[in-house]
C-alpha cells in the first residue's frame, strides 16, 4: 500500500472515531442511538419519526457529515453486526469485504 492509500485509511478511521463520539453524545442526550433509517443524518438535523429524540441538541452534533476518502457516504447500522452500532466505509472498491485499501473500515476494526 502506498502513502496516499495509507492516508485515506487514516482519514476514514479518524472520521469514524468522530462520528462514534458524536453518536455517543446523541445517546447520552436521547437515551438511545438513532435508528438505521434515521441514520447519521440525525447528527446534523433532528430526525422525524420513531424513535423521536426528546433532548436533541439544538444546532446538531456535527456541522456536516463527512464523505469517506473515496467520496461515498459512511454507512450506519443500528443494531450493528459487530456491536451496538456499526459505522463504516466499504473501502476503495465500495464493495463489502476486501483486503488492503479495499477492506471495509469500521468502528469495530479501528485499531488494526
Image (spheres, rainbow, N blue to C red):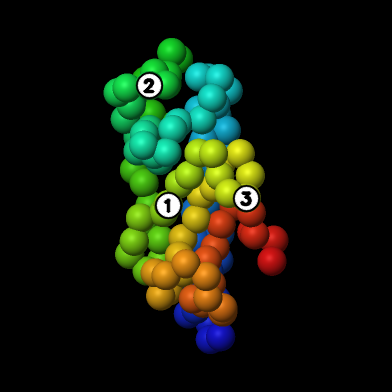
Residue sitting at the far top: 54
| Disc 3 element | loop
Give whichever of 94, 58 is nearer the camera: 94
Which residue is pictured at 49% across the width and 76% down the height? 102
Q: State left or right for residue 103 relative to residue 39.
A: right
Task: Find residue 75 and name its label.
Answer: 1
Dot 3 surroundings within 10 Å: few (below 14), some, or many (20 or more)?
Answer: few
Residue sitting at the far bottom: 2
Label 2 sits on residue: 50
Q: Is residue 2 above or below residue 89?
A: below
Label 3 sits on residue: 82
Q: State left or right for residue 84 relative to residue 50.
A: right
Give whichever of 26, 90 is nearer the camera: 90
| Disc 2 element | loop
Q: Residue 36: percent from the left, percent from the top?
A: 42, 38
Pair 2/1: label in front: 2
Q: Residue 105: percent from the left, percent from the top?
A: 54, 63
Amino acid at each position: 500500500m502506498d502513502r496516499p492509500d495509507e492516508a485515506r485509511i487514516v482519514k476514514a478511521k479518524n472520521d469514524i472515531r468522530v462520528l462514534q463520539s458524536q453518536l455517543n453524545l446523541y445517546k447520552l442526550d436521547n437515551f438511545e442511538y438513532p435508528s438505521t433509517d434515521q441514520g447519521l443524518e440525525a447528527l446534523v438535523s433532528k430526525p422525524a419519526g420513531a424513535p423521536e429524540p426528546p433532548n436533541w441538541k439544538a444546532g446538531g452534533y456535527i456541522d456536516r457529515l463527512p464523505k469517506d476518502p473515496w467520496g461515498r457516504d459512511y454507512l450506519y447500522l443500528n443494531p450493528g453486526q459487530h456491536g451496538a452500532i456499526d459505522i463504516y466505509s466499504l473501502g476503495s472498491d465500495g464493495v463489502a469485504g476486501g483486503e488492503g485499501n479495499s477492506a471495509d473500515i469500521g468502528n469495530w476494526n479501528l485499531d488494526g
